[in-house]
Image: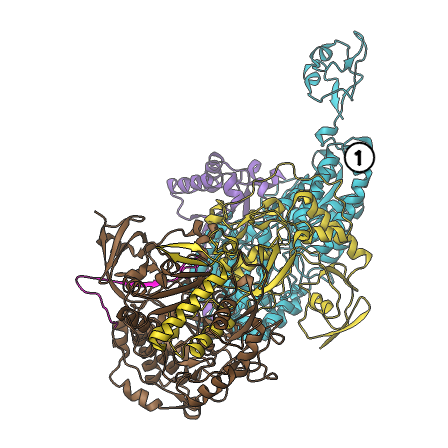
Amino acid sequence: MTNSIREVIHNEVIFVIGSNTTENHPVIGAMMRQAVKNGAKLIVADPRRIPLARDADIYLPIQPGTNVALLNGMIKTILEEKLYDEEFIRERTVDFNRMAEALKDCSVAKSAALCQVSEEDIRRAARLYASSHKSGIYYAMGITQHSRGTEGVYNIANLAMMTGNVGVEFAGVNPLRGQSNVQGSCDLGGLPDVYPGYQKVADEKAKARFEASWGVQGLSREPGLTLPKMVDKALEGKIKMIYIMGENPMVSDPDLTHFEAALDNLDFLVVQDIFMTETAQKADVVLPAAAFAEKDGTFTNTERRIQRIRKALDPPGEAKADWWIINELMKRMGYQNAFANPEEIMAEIAGVTPIYGGIDYERIDSKGLQWPVKDKSHPGTPYLHRDRFTRGLGQFMPVTYTESAETADEAYPLILTTGRLLYHYHTRSMTGRIPGLNEVVGESYVEICPKTAALYGLENGEWVTVRSRRGEIKIKVKITEDIKEDVVFIPFHFADAAVNRLTNVALDPIADIPELKVAAVRIEKLA
Amino acid sequence: MKTFEELIALKEEIIAGEAPDEIKIMVGMATCGISAGAKPVMQALKDCVEEKGLSKVKVKQTGCIGVCRLEPMFEIFEPGGRRTTYVDMTPEKAVEVVEEHLIKHHIIERYTIGAYD
Amino acid sequence: MIKLTIDGIGVEVEKGTSILDAAKSVAINIPTLCHDDRLKPSGACRICGVEVEGSDELQASCTTPAREGMVIHTRSDRVAAARKQLLELIWEDHPNECLSCQKAGECTLQDLCYDYGVEAEGFAPLKVRTPLDTSNPFYTFDKDKCILCGKCVRVCEELQGESAIHFVQRGHETMISHPFEKGMAFSTCVSCGNCVQVCPTAALMPKTEEKFRVWDIEKKVRTTCSYCGVGCQLDLVIKDNKVVRVDAARDGENEGMLCVKGKFGYSFLNHKDRLTMPLIREGGVFREASWDEALDLVAGRMTEVYDHSGSDAFAAFASARCTNEDNYVLQKMMRGIFKTNNIDHCARL
Amino acid sequence: MENKHSILEMDYIERQERIALKNCGLIDPERIEEYIRYEGYQALAKAILKLGPEGVIEEIEASGLRGRGGAGFPTGRKWRSGYLAKGGEKFIICNADEGDPGAFMDRSILEGDPHSVIEAMTIAGYAIGASKGFIYVRAEYPIAVKRLQIAIDQAHGMGFLGRDIFGSGFEFDIELRLGAGAFVCGEAKALIASIEGKRGMPTPKPPRTNDKGLWGKPTILNNVETFANVPPIIRKGSGWYAGIGSEKSKGTKVFALGGKINRTGLVEIPIGTPLREVIYDIGGGIPDNKKFKAVQTGGPSGGCIPKEHLDVKIDYESLQEIGSMMGSGGMIVMDEDNCMVDIARFFLEFSVEESCGKCTPCREGTKKMLSILDKIASGEGVMEDLDYLQSLGNVIKETSLCGLGKTAPNPVLSTLKYFRDEYEAHVKDKTCPAGVCQALLEYYITEKCIGCGACKRVCPVNCISGEKKQLHTIDPVACIRCGACQEACPVDAIIKR
């Protein structure tokens, strides 16, 4: 998030696109509702009538895969009706005209047709969003998990910049991160092209800095493989060993059939986790890890706040903290400068990661700090891009609409989209073991609207086969008014009826994010 | 309706619309009257007035004058300002009042408010 | 700014400040049952009444704004007597079950009755108990222990935005319920537990696997929720090396709010399926091993692969659910030892 | 002497002063023409065409009109604060949620003269700058609802409501909102909550509704009778109105006379009229030559006034001084056959049932007081109960959230004050002097007894003794008060006392 969580309740306009906030970030969702009670206006764009849609002033039930078209329609409206912030564009950005030029052939009407919403609704949403300098955009995987996901993100930035709604308080471009430390794992080098703090591996200075700090030589300047590419290389036999820490890709990753074959092709697979997950079952060695309540450390949340987690319990049996396990391995492979505790690790992190430069456990003991925290006296950064963007001037990135990699056709006439539920988390390795949660939602289902259900003669609770070009699953039907015609939704949490047997691995060319939100499927009644 | 004069003119017009020899019977038709049985009384008055061809007599409803204990009641307004209040009415008594008071022009003393209070 | 006197102390506050907050600013705590800083003042319990010189009535300090020159007494005999009488009224309608109540020791009603000398005897406890509503998987509702402070209703409406519960009936029959009154589980409740968190008595209680009372609690450990990326702050309540309850923290960005997972989704920690020993696959099945054996095996195999196939043969999945420190160490191993940048994680999923 | 024929000639009507009720019984409420015929809508015309908003407010202020819903807040001051309140949208609300037991002043006005309320609300809207009004009326008043709706439609048809009223550009509209009959919804904040579609529960003041009322906008709320006074004031001038009534309270007040009084019904009298005049001269005194005991004014929020205060002048302050209140206009007369403990119980029971249940003292406290009254009425009371009633009553008064709770103990406190002897009789002597409280009655055999023994034979508990042809006696301790003896007595010698 460019801005802070508590700013939500001060927004004048909230634009939620591709985020089922009340279910997936419930506390932020609740704050959005508080804001609405305070008088904020709410725009919701989602193929499903998510719970927030009932609070919305404008609800846009867009077709899956048409985010870019919707955003272009809004941008076009703002251009045509001159609702943009000229001063902000002039002072803070470049290439506004280039973007306007690129949208020459776009029309709001075309966007409306692609999104299957009315032109007037798109215009109303645009006017509303542009009417305030306290307009915040909130999005999640509904924007990114597309074959053109990065373009969706660019377009959100375009919209925010042209209306002066970024780099100021109570506005911003706010991706909501789905997992407890997804922000931190990105911040701290869990990505193939960057060291901790987003320092490029290709950068000679960064390489030198880390070599010096770690006391090693010969760090690679070659960016590594992204996860989908690793899978391909494993299938080819080029990657022989994978080390998996606390992940369950055998449920969460797209096109599982393909993925499973890749794991089977490895020489050696190590998995460390707290449970015997679907992935761990494929491992050669499984290492028992401590859970969050059994170790010290930090998580970085979606507003970039580095917060403590603390050991409250002893881990069960011989389970150990993840850092300890890897630390031990490194020792065994001859690395000398091992760590004694997490606090020491954070001290090293602060030394090599400028955005974490001022972090130490003492400072964040009672309240976390939001990066960048450059040094020990830096107070943290509640919102980014104040006065100037990190890169200097804000860059408009013209985007034109490209349709999803897979669209409905005669053989696969329905569009499948996926997501999370309030009552479960990721691959259910934790929530699947909590009786109450499974009392509420104990099994997977496919959401389908009454009209489409009637077309296929389906009844609520009936078991069906859902089939895509990549696989099939058996699953129960749940008929609901809250989804568009010809669109179906399956939560991805469940290993039985794993929806990722159906999803498409088509990747965004820039971020390598798979198109989990759009796949063509068909539904067959069981014989 | 835009001016004071228009409103006054309308009022005058309404008054002028009343025939000079019109007789009004105002029947108490508030909750208290109706619950005491004013509806059949009013119906009886209307029927009787029509039956007897008393074209100058208008039977109308009105609100509660405050003596709810004496409902059903009605008041006869006659030209010249005479007002007679009949109380504790029944449809039968009402017919009697039409016949005696309106046709024969004599007040049925025992039904008037003065006889009761 | 407004100047006033509270219990003889001069106070200066901004216009619009309640008497309650004005008193708090000089460390005078006025007791309340229905007040919560995050909610619009309701003025329901009337326990916070104070004496304002020149006024016949006691003024509810939560809803009465401080005014220039007010002279306020928060603990005069008159105030104390009124509070005691109000508490007696509440207590009289409350089951006399402190002996067996899990909330004992953490119950605001119990504490206030103690403070103001309300005697249990002389007031008959309810004879017929309303059955506990256990329909919700995560919490119970005990109508008889409800003192109608309304905090749950207001939290649900004002903070959570669900409005799943309401007051129904009138007068002495008033109670908290929901449409159709079939049990909490049949309402639109999303089980966030934010009502449970604010309940001053045992009317709304989290379901717990084992009984415990406040004095059984070994410690409360402040930490960050391990579910979504909001990073809610919470306290793990620990007894016998087990989490027995989760309390939302007021001073985190979540300001005392949690969701169903954060509030009630902790029992996986003690689940019997937890991995407790390193496991090595042998002949298609796993067998338990010591750390030394497992670590030596992994280190050995990795060295072997590195020696034979080089850096490009390695890959690692970091984790969006592990700590910053865990992830840092993993990437350090991949980059520093195996000289590969083949590290990624499911940030995209 | 010749009988009086018209109601107008009746002495008890002549003593009244009809302003709010002036058209009731005179016009057909379903015909706007008849309202216009009797000067209807001239006040609105004058307000808009001659006075202007400030002029209207000045007139209302100068008239001395005070809220007739009970509290007596000066109407002009209320309107002025509405006029001065900032904020684009403002609202006018007419409180027609009449709820006191036995009170029907507002119903009569709505049924008999609905246009007077509509005209007044429009004047109020014009004065403070509101363009929308609501009438919150009980659904139990179907005739009033029907006639109001007819009147609103007719006013629209004539241009007294809607756009550009009297060519001034002023726009005003009125909607009806039906209340479900909860007494507390007569409380301003609860009423507003109810119009907003929420549970009718009072919320704390401040903010006052004048500043933040309906949907958080400035809102002026007056009751029916208050509004009904407005058109005559504007038409005839504040000087005329201020000439009626007492020094502090101007104009008239409508009362609903009920209970042990000869002429029950509605009366409208100048404020300041002595209570005695209302009860004896207008109300015709107590039936059956019974003795006057007390009069209860102000409904369940009011108090009982004993005979020593019969000469009190009826106005807001004087009634309050003696522990009662003006209230919305209920006036219930009690005679020697009324037990004051029982009366207190009756009114308190009403408050207990109608409490919204939000605040502790009203919800729990009134219930507790009622249970103590029950205890006293059944002869189980102890003297400490009287002290407890007093102190609990005071706590409820001084701690309750809204007016309902703050006044709910009044019937008990005022009877405790003026009729303590009756309470003590119940507690100490275990008797009910008025012979009302069933549990305290004693069967007693008088001198009329002929000693036939019929009673003795039917007594199921054998508590009657006496020799043949001698005076029999009942053992009051063993008696179960079944009444069989009384039935059996051939000479009516057995009485209850």
The answer to whether C160 is drawn above or below residue D46 in the figure is above
Residue D280: quadrant of the picture: top right
Magenta span: A404-427
The colour chain B appears in is purple
Residue at x 34%, y 85% (from the top left corner): A397
Chain A takes which shade in the image? brown
Q: Quadrant of the N terminus of chain D?
A: top right
Q: Position of residue A94 (x, y in %)?
A: 38, 91
Whether residue B12 is visible here, answered yes or no, is: no
> Residue C238: x, y in percent?
61, 56
| Picture colour for chain D | cyan
Q: Which residue was labeled with disc 1?
A: D427
Q: Colour of chain C?
A: yellow
Q: Tell whether position D389 is magenta.
A: no
Magenta: main secondary structure equals loop
Q: Height in image: A454 above or below A371?
A: above
User: How many numbered discs?
Assistant: 1
Q: Position of residue C242 (x, y in %)?
A: 58, 54
Pointer 1 local density, CA inside 10 Å: few below 14, some 14–19, many at least 20: many
Q: Residue at x 32, y 82 (%)?
A: A76
Q: Nearer the viewer, residue D112 or A182?
A: A182
| In the foreground, C261 or B106 | C261
* Chain letter of the residue beneath label 1 in the structure image: D
Q: Farthest residue toward the bottom?
A: A91
Instruction: Name the one closer to the observer, A284 or B66.
Output: A284
Work out whether residue A388 can be spotted: yes
Quadrant position of residue D307: top right
Q: Position of residue A459 (x, y in %)?
A: 28, 48
Which secondary structure, mark 1?
helix
Q: Is residue D309 left or right of residue D161?
A: right
Type of amino acid under label 1 = Val
